[in-house]
Each structure stands twice: as structure tokens, then as C-alpha cells.
Amino acid sequence: MSPVRLLFPFILFSTCFFSPLPAGDAAFSANGERVYCLENGSAHVEEIVLASGKRTMHDLSAGVPKDAVIRAIVRGGDGGLRLAIGAELRRWDPPVTQLETFCRTPDGSEIEEVALEPNSNALLLVSRKSTWLKLPRREALVPVFERRQRVGDAPFFTESGELFFCADGDVWRGSIEVHDTEGAPGGTIRGVLTAARLAPLAASETDEGTPSGEGAREVVVAGERMLVHVSRMGGSGWGDLVRLARPERVGAVDQSSVRNTWELFRKMLVPLDTWEANNGITFLCVAPDQHTVFFRTDEGSWIWNKDASKPEKLSLKD
């Protein structure tokens, strides 16, 4: 049986530096009316009703082992939420506090990042040791082969199947191919990561002092724009939310030569503009229709519609 190749085109951002900046994650509800914000290391999730600004704090500590923390939150294909707790992905249906085990990494490595591919409802799970796909109607996780570059921070799929993540502070783009030969003797199924850098955003440096270079840490896409949280890649301190053109809008570029690659970099960076300052957790996430973006900056919490020139500040209340 010949291999079945299912292509998930995507864009990859990754930062492989481990910054002491407080990490966090966020996800929209299935109906796009609520946002759930998780501060890494906490067993509490903040729920925000966007229409009213009402905030509710959910205490999930009863479902979190003492030696584990909640590291990521994502919307599942069935509308429920998924929480990464240790080596497990658990289902959560607010407002109940009960958590149900959904899947577990075969090697027992702790899950650090999770992303939903909205077309197939597949979930991408990333740990420090390995990367896996949780395909619908398949109980066992599918391993993803990564040769020279791993899927990094903040993986995110667009409505068309593109995926973004951060690697060493730069933007990457590529694809995951699912090779399925299980119908043949000795056959297997696995994913394969193929990617290339898309836009060099890292401002790297070295000296005897604390690291001060900045790079991409989170990314989402809405409408004609990519929104990227660029922040310090070591230590604590400064950061900004910046906007770039969506890659398809700069035109097709063949990256088979260095000259062509440099031309792509130029096209990606020319429209870059700094939007909002943010020195902490951004909670950057996109609604299921991928028209609305939620984020938090030094000045508060914001909603931006892909057709709006400016974001709208939310008035939050307990």
C-alpha cells in the first residue's frame, strides 16, 4: 500500500530560550463569547465574558496533582477545552471543575504546548522530548518526526491549516505530512515536520550581562495580519505586540536559493509595525471564526477585529 500523505501547511514560530518572564496561555470558547486565560504554574483559570467584561476565576486545583501544573489550554474539536497537565491532556467543560483524562504522551514527557487544527480537529502536542498528533477517531497518539528543527513555542493553526510557532525568536513556515502505511506488512503511521524560516525577528546579542535580546514568543493570524508578541529572550522586562503582513499577501517566493530567501525576509519585515507595549503575559488567542483576537498588554485587555484599524479596550469587572 502506498503512503497516504495528508498535508497540514503551516507557519512556525519558535523561541528555544527559557525566559523567566511569566508564561501563560489562553483560548476562546467554541461560540467565541468567552476567553479563558491561564497563567502557567497556576491551577486557576480566568474566564472573561467578552460582551459584559465579567470575570470569573475557576479553581481547578482538585483535579491537578500536587507535583504537576497546568501548562497549556486549547479548544478541542468537540467544543470542550483541553488542559495540559503533566503528561496528560485533560478535558474541561466549564463551569464544572471536574477534569477527565483525554490522552497521555506514550513516553511520559510533560506536555508544554497544544494546538488545534480546525479542519481535521487534530491536536498537536509538544513536550520537551517529543511531538505528537492526536487524530480524531484514533486512540493512540501519532509521533511527529523532527530532524533539524522542532516545533517550538505557541503553535497555532489557521482556518486553512497553516500552523505558526516560534523558533529562536524567528518566524517559520512549513508543513506536517502524515504518512500512513499501516495497511502494509510492517507499516506504521507518523507525522513528519518540514519547515523553513519565514521572517527573522530575533535581535540576538551576547555580553557579560543579563540577556537583553528580543524575539518572537507568540503569534496568531487574523485577516490580513499576523500579530506577534516580541519580548526579551532571557531575564525579565520589555516586550511589544507587533503586526506583520500575512505571508500569502507578500506573494509566492521560491526559497530554494539564499537570494530568494533574503527577498522573502525583506517582504515580511517591511510592513512590520509596533502596536502595543507589553512586558508581561499577552494571552494572545483567536476566536474560532479567526476574525477576532484577544490579548492583554500593560494597559489592559483588548479585543481586535480583523477589519478594525484599532483594538477595543475591554472594561473588566468581577
Image (tube, grey):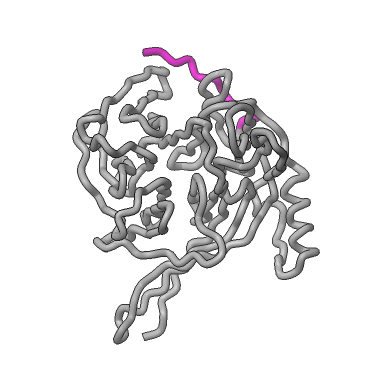
Residue shown at the point (41%, 37%) measured from the top left: 27
Question: Image quadrant for the C terminus?
Answer: top left
Which residue is at the front of the view, 150 or 103? 150
**Was residue 314 drawn as part of the magenta stretch in this picture?**
yes
Vertical side of 176 occupied by 98: above or below: above
Residue 308 percent coordinates (x, y): 61, 30
In percent of width and height, residue 304 lies at: 56, 30
| In this rendering, position of residue 237 left or right of residue 131 | right
Q: Residue furthest front?
A: 208
Quadrant the N terminus occupies: bottom left
The relative height of residue 156 versus residue 316 in the rendered view (above or below) is below
SS assignment for the magenta stretch, majority: loop
Residue at (30% x, 49% y) in the render: 87
Question: At 70% from the left edge and 44% from the top edge, which residue is drawn?
Answer: 204
Judge by depth and name the residue closer to the eye, 56 or 145: 145
Q: Is residue 10 visible?
A: yes
Magenta stretch containing residue 14, yes or no?
no
Q: Residue at x 33, y 49 (%)?
A: 77
- In the image, taking residue 108 as reference, residue 193 lies left or right, namely right
**Residue 117 appears in the figure:** no
Q: Is residue 38 above or below residue 175?
A: above
Counting labels gives: 0
Please identify the residue farthest to the top as the structure is shown. Answer: 317
Which contiguous range is marked in magenta? 308-318
Left of 151 or right of it: where is 53? left
- Foreground pick, 124 / 168: 168
> Is residue 229 toward the left or the right of residue 35 in the image?
right
State the image coordinates of residue 125 (x, y, percent, origin top left).
39, 53
Q: Quadrant of residue 276?
A: top right
